[in-house]
Amino acid sequence: MTVIWSFPIRSWIVIGALALGACGGGGSGEQSRVPSDFPREEASRSRSSALPDHGANVVSRWSRVAMDTYNGTRSGPATTPEDLRPLWPVDLATVHLAMYDAAMAIARTHKPYAIEPSAPTEGASIDAAVGAAAHGVLKALFPTRASVFQSAYDSWFATLPDGPARDRGLAVGAEVAAGIVALRANDGRSVVLPPFAPGTQPGDFRGLNPITPWFPYVKPFVIRHAAQFRTDGPPALSSRRYARDWKEVFELGGATSAMRTTEQTEIARSHTEFPNTYWPRNLRQFATSQPTVAENARLMAMIWTGMADTLLGCFESKYHHLFWRPASAITLADSDGNDATFADSAWLPLGPVPNHPEYPAAHACIAGTLSETLKQAFGTRKLSFSFNSTETGTTHTWASLDEMADELREARIWGGMHFRTSLVDGTVLGQQTARYVMRHAFEPRRCRDHAASAEAAGDSRCD
C-alpha cells in the first residue's frame, strides 16, 4: 500500500456585489486552472444542458448507504471519534475518497488521492472494489450503525458475480479503505476546548454552546490548513456597508416582513432542511451523471472533498471573527454606533438560525465551492438540475449553476440569518478552495510515452 420546485431568482440579486467581493475576501493568490481533461467553458449564449443520467451504479448506491449510515441511530455508546463527533462533510468525503481511490486502482485514468493498493488489480471488478472500499470506511468510522451499512453490504454482495474478479476487487477495496481510515486517524475533531464564552461587545456573537466549535481543528483533505483562505472579516459596525447590510436583512428577513414575497418565503424555508440530509440526498444525482463508474467516483470525490475543505475553512473564519447574527444586530442596534440603524426588540428572523457565528455564511461557502467544482467538471455554468427539500416538500429547478448559487445566498437573507457581506465573502472562500483542490488532486495520469492510454503503450501503469 502506498499512501500518496422551480423558482428563477429575479431582480433581487445583487450581482455586482459579488463581482466586487471577488476582488477581496482574503485571497491567497492561488490561480484557477481547469484540469486538462475537462471541457472548456461554453459560449455565453449557449443553451442550458440538462444534467445527464446514466443510471444507478455502485457509486450512487454506496453514496446513499453512506448518507443513511451517517444519519442512522447508534446501537450503543459511541466507540469512535466519528461516532462521538460526526461531521457530515468530512465523514462523507472520506467515504467518497475511498471509492475514488479504489476505482482508480483499477481504471487507472487519474492519480489516486492517497492510496495505491498492493493487492493485484489486473482483472479486478471495479464494482466490487468501490463497494468494498465504502463499506470498509463506514465499518471503521461508525461501527455502532452496522444495522444500516451491513445489511446494505449483504444485499449488494449478493448481486456480485462469483469469481476471481469479485475477490480481487474486494481485496483492493478493503486495502484502500484501511489506508484511507489510517490516513484520517486522529483528524483533530477530538480536541478538548474550554467552555465557549459568548461576547458582550457590539458585534460579538451571542450564542450559547455553539455547534461544532472543534470543526476548525480538523485536518483538511487537500488545502494546507484551515485558515488558508480565511476571509477578511465583516464590515465595521459604523460603516455604510454595514448599514446597507443591516437594512436589507431587517426589511426582508424578519418573521413578519411585509416586503418579502410568498415566493421568497418559500425559498428561504426550503433551505432550512438539515444539511446532513439535504446535501447528500441532492448531490447523489451527480453520481449517475457520468458514463462510467470511475468517472462518477471521481466527480463525487471532487464534490465532497471540496465541500469538506470549504466548510472547514468557512468555520475557521466563523470562529475567528465571531460576528453576531442579525437577530442580535437588530435587537441591540442602539449599541453599534451607527446612526443608520435602530434597535427593534421585537424583531425575529423568519427561519431557524443555526447556532454558530454569522460570518461568513456556510450556505454561501457551499454555493461557491459547488458551483466552481461543477463548472470545471462539466465545462459550463449552464447546467440544468433540481434539488428538493423535505422542509417544504418542494423541488427547485435551475437553468444554471449561477441560479443555484444565487438562490442559496438570497435564501439566507430572506430567512433572516445572514448579511450580504457574509454571503459575498463566503462565496469567494468556496471558489478559492475548490480551485485549489482541483489544482492539487484528481488529476489525470500521464503515460511515459504520451500514448493515448497505458495499454496502447504496452504498460499497464502510468506514472
Image (cartoon, rainbow, N blue to C red):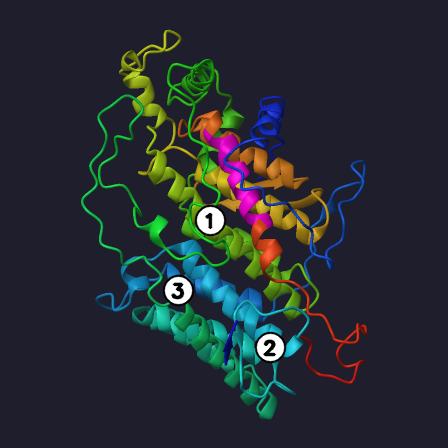
The residue segment tinted magenta is: 422-435
Between disc 1 and disc 3, whose residue precedes?
3
Q: As shown in the figure, which amino acid type bears the numbered disc 2?
A: Ala
Near-viewer residue (121 or 165): 121
On the question of residue 353 being in view, the answer is no
Q: Which residue ends up furthest to the bottom in the rendered image?
A: 163
The numbered disc on residue 278 is: 1
Identify the residue under disc 2. 105
Where's residue 156, x and y in %?
A: 51, 77
Give the quadrant of the C terminus: bottom right
| Residues at discs 2 and 1 in contact (Cβ within 8 Å) | no
Asked whether the beta carbons under mark 1 and mark 3 sit within 8 Å of each other, the answer is no
What amino acid type should be assigned to the residue bearing mark 3?
A: Thr
Q: In the rendered structure, which amino acid carries the disc numbered 1?
A: Tyr
Q: Which of marks 3 and 2 is nearer the N terminus?
A: 3
Residue at 78 percent across and 44 percent down: it is 42
